[in-house]
Amino acid sequence: MTARQHASRMAAECIGVRIRLLNRIVTNVYDTALRPLGLKTSQLNVLAAAAYLGVARPAEVAERLQMDVSTLSRNIDRMKNRGWLEVVPDEDGRMQPFQLTREGQALFEKAFPLWEKAQQQVETLLGDDGVTHLRAAAEDFFRIPPR
């Protein structure tokens, strides 16, 4: 096979390419829904983690969200500057656990109905089978509890 044939096969069959494309499409749906609040999907995920954990440790959040710690740190810094997150004092000054501020909590509450609407759009886009397979994969690979 020639390089062109290999490339053609990859373009037609590559799961990685398809998932990255789907990720961009899905992220755009959520980002568009959240835009009126000045919020991005990645930031909403951090707000949700902080809301769930109460006091969130960056390493734990990075692991749960499958994010690079340095990328998460940049997001946290931006969100602290916007008044959505605050650092919680800790014995280990390097860890810098964080939590939602009142403004962050209010933003999260405003974002939830927008997220729900985007969620419905994405579920329609993926269809019932796609959603079922995606949830099953997440449960298997990422130890996400079933609904």
Image (cartoon, rainbow, N blue to C red):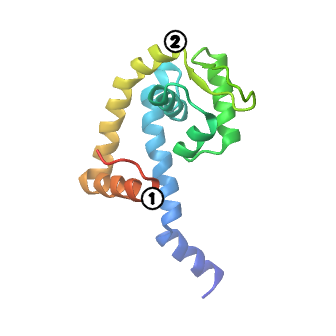
**Is residue 20 positioned above or below 25 on the image?**
below
Q: Which residue is at 75% across, 27% downward?
A: 93
Give the Cα distance between marks 1 and 2: 34 Å
Graded by Cα atoms within 10 Å as few (under 14), some (14 to 19) or many (20 or more), the crowding at tag 1 reads: few
**Residue 96 percent coordinates (x, y):** 68, 27
Residue 19, position as x, y percentages in the image: 48, 57
Q: Residue 80: horizontal and vertical position, in percent?
A: 64, 19
Q: Give the quarter of the figure containing the C terminus.
A: top left
Mark closest to the chain's N terminus, 1 or 2? 2
Q: Which amino acid does label 2 sit on?
A: Glu
Q: What element carries label 1?
A: helix
Disc marking residue 112? none
What residue is at 42 percent from the left and 37 percent from the top? Answer: 29
Which residue matches tag 1?
Answer: 141
- Give the residue at x 49% y 32%: 49
Q: Is residue 16 left or right of residue 117?
A: right
Q: Position of residue 37 (x, y in %)?
A: 48, 19
Is residue 64 or residue 107 the one in the foreground? 64
Of residues 26 and 79, which is closer to you in this image? 79
* 6 up-or-down from 58: above or below: below
Residue contact at pointers 1 and 2, CB within 8 angstroms: no
Residue furthest out toward the right? 94
Q: Name the residue under label 2.
A: 103
Q: Residue flagged by tag 1: what amino acid is it?
A: Phe
Res. 99 image quadrant: top right
Q: Which residue lies furthest to the top in this view?
A: 102
Is 125 on the left or on the right of 20, as rendered? left
Circle 2: is it few (<14), some (14-19), or many (20+) Cα within 10 Å?
few
Determine whether, in the image, residue 50 is placed left or right of residue 57: left
Q: What element carries label 2?
A: helix
